[in-house]
Image (cartoon, rainbow, N blue to C red):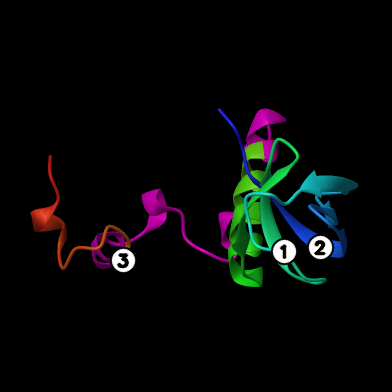
Amino acid sequence: MCIGIPMQVLRTEPGHAWVAGRGEVKRVDTALIDEPHEGEWLLVFLDAARERIDAGRAAEVNGVLDLLQCALAGASTHPFDEVGFALPSRMDPTALAALAGRATLEHLPE
């Protein structure tokens, strides 16, 4: 399983970008996306940029990665409300249906 890491572009060079995120700076391959620009956010898998994302999506992914890091460290009291979005397990039925692209949960397959 690969986990995408949100990283912000610091500078570019042909076919590559220097990016920063989650405490590291590194050079990534940009062959799979159009040439990025400074300040843009990229989702990086295995040292290759796979897609552009906006700052909001980067914050969501970082929030989930923070939760995962807490869980792996054995923390049981991480405040979910500080993540800035609701996990599906904490959503009300209407919000969950909207996330699934449905009008109501009644139409979701069992």
**Residue at the spot 84% in from the left edge and 55% down from the top edge:** 19
Residue at numbered disc 2: 9
**The N terminus, quarter of image:** top right
Rendered location of residue 53, percent (x, y): 61, 64
Q: Is residue 106 left or right of residue 71?
A: left
Q: Nearer the viewer, residue 8 or 60?
A: 8
**The C terminus, quarter of image:** top left
Front of the two marks 1 and 3: 1
Q: Is label 1 in a helix, a strand or a loop? A: loop
Rendered location of residue 40, percent (x, y): 73, 69
Residue at numbered disc 3: 95
Q: What amino acid type should be assigned to the residue bearing mark 2?
A: Val
Q: Is residue 45 left or right of residue 95?
A: right
Q: Which residues are magenta?
A: 69-98
The quarter of the displayed image where residue 12 is located = bottom right
Q: Which mark is residue 47?
A: none
